Image: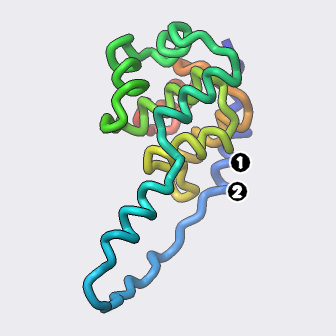
Amino acid sequence: MTQINFEEIDAYIKSELHFSAPEPVLVIKSPSPNYGSINEFIQQSDDILQDNIRKIILSKQLDEVEVYKKADIDRKLFSKIRTKPDYHPNKNTLLKLCLAMNLDTDETESLLNSAGYSLSRSLRSDLILRYCFGHRIYDVITVNQILDHYGEKVI
């Protein structure tokens, strides 16, 4: 089991926690949108979650069964995530998969972004997760112990 250095985590959170005022919302009035160009734009995106998971598993030569077991998700859910492009897993499920695949912070951000999520620098729980990915703490139980220690929801 990994030794948890809470003092180091405290220092990291204090140095990284940023709050910013929300950006003002601009209203842009224009003629009716060009739906053809919108559809073209949408189809250009090659950042598909299922493809990204498959690429990571192949590039790291991981065993899918070990990944979903280490992530503590069941086989049916993992299969749904991997094979159904219209299925949108929640952020915590993806975070557990990122831990199970031993992703670094950048790889985690990239995978989360392909599902419409991110690790915020304004949320303490996300900073703790950034710390864990950056310090190669990949055990879900250990990560949950750290989150719980700081009064955050476990993943």
Q: Which amino acid does label 1 sit on?
A: Ala
Q: Which residue is drawn at 65% across and 54% down?
A: 14
As drawn, 88 above or below 118: above
Q: Residue at x 57, y 30 (%)?
A: 98
Quarter of the rendering containing residue 52:
top right
Looking at the image, which residue sits at the far front? Answer: 36
Q: In this image, 5 relative to 90: left or right? A: right
Task: Give the residue pinned by disc 1.
Answer: 11
Q: Say whether residue 125 is visible.
A: no
As drawn, 110 above or below 81: below
User: Would you call the spot at circle 2 few (<14 residues within 10 Å), some (14-19), or many (20 or more)?
Assistant: few
Q: Which amino acid does label 2 sit on?
A: Ser
Q: Which residue is drawn at 54% across and 67% down?
A: 19
Circle 2 — which element? Answer: helix
Q: Say whether residue 151 is visible.
A: yes
Residue 88 x, y percent position in the rendering: 34, 38
| Callouts 2 and 1 close, C-beta under 8 Å | yes
Q: Which residue is drawn at 53% across and 54% down?
A: 120
Name the quadrant of the C terminus: top left
Task: Give the residue pinned by disc 2.
Answer: 15
Residue 77 x, y percent position in the rendering: 34, 20
Residue 50 x, y percent position in the rendering: 47, 32
